[in-house]
Image (cartoon, rainbow, N blue to C red):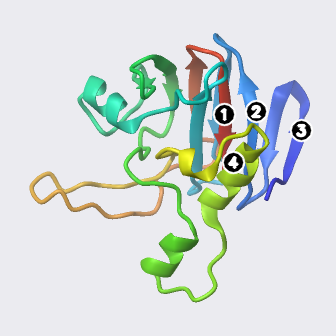
């Protein structure tokens, strides 16, 4: 479902449980704001000139040597090109391990009989207008999502976000991109 409001100064406000897609040019800044605190926004990016080039958590982790990405870290594509640079981050905790939640997430993990389509469904709907099929959606950069990992066992948990109202993460595009945000 896409439910957005275009606000002044290029600001797009998303209603809860919705998504959108838009173009960002190389050098442009994208700011994701948590307006109320404790919210999460799934973000994926594709090269505007070749949608087979897509944001990659694996390449990013390889080159950053950390799973906790914040200010001055780079986000890479599946072709090892820099897609985004994080230039400001007031929260400091985001997830790039977990896939967008989906009907299957709610069915398999939580036992929901008739789950909603989740973040994956929102991303699929918004990216479809760019010819990007659901099977091509990568692991999302989950802004403000808090997923601690036990260093000894590798076990992770999904905890409530630590973001407060007004926290934000700012990216600069290092190539022309199609962005999708839920």
> Mark 2 touching mark 1, by CB under 8 A?
yes
> Mark 3 touching mark 2, by CB under 8 A?
no
The foreground one among 15 and 180 is 180
Residue 102 pos. (x, y %): 56, 66
Q: Secondary structure at mark 2?
A: strand
Q: Is residue 96 above or below residue 90?
A: below
Closer to the chain start, of discs 3 and 2, is: 3
User: Alpha-carbon distance for marks 3 and 2?
Assistant: 12 Å
- Identify the residue under disc 3: 6
- Circle 1 packing at 10 Å, graded few (<14), some (14-19), many (20+), is many
Closer to the chain start, of discs 4 and 2, is: 2
- Identify the residue under disc 4: 35
* Label of residue 22 in the image: 2
Q: Can you tell which quarter of the image residue 166 is in?
A: top right
Q: Can you tell which quarter of the image residue 18 is in?
A: bottom right
* Residue 168 at least partly seen: no
Q: Is residue 64 left or right of residue 90?
A: left
């Amino acid at each position: 479902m896409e439910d957005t409001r275009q606000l002044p100064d290029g600001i797009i406000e998303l209603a809860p449980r919705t998504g959108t897609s838009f173009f960002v040019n190389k050098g442009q800044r994208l700011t994701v704001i948590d307006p109320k605190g404790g919210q999460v926004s799934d973000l994926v990016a594709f090269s505007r000139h070749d949608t087979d080039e897509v944001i990659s958590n694996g390449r990013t982790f390889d080159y950053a040597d950390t799973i906790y990405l914040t200010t001055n870290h780079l986000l890479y594509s599946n072709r090892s090109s820099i897609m985004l640079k994080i230039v400001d981050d007031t929260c400091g905790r985001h997830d790039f391990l977990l896939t967008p939640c989906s009907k299957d997430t709610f069915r398999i993990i939580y036992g929901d009989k008739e789950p909603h389509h989740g973040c994956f469904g929102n991303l699929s709907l918004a990216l479809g207008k760019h010819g990007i099929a659901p099977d091509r959606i990568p692991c999302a950069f989950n802004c403000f999502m808090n997923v601690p990992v036990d260093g000894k066992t590798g076990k992770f948990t999904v905890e409530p976000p630590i973001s407060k109202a007004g926290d934000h993460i700012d990216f600069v595009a290092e190539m022309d991109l199609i962005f999708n945000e839920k």
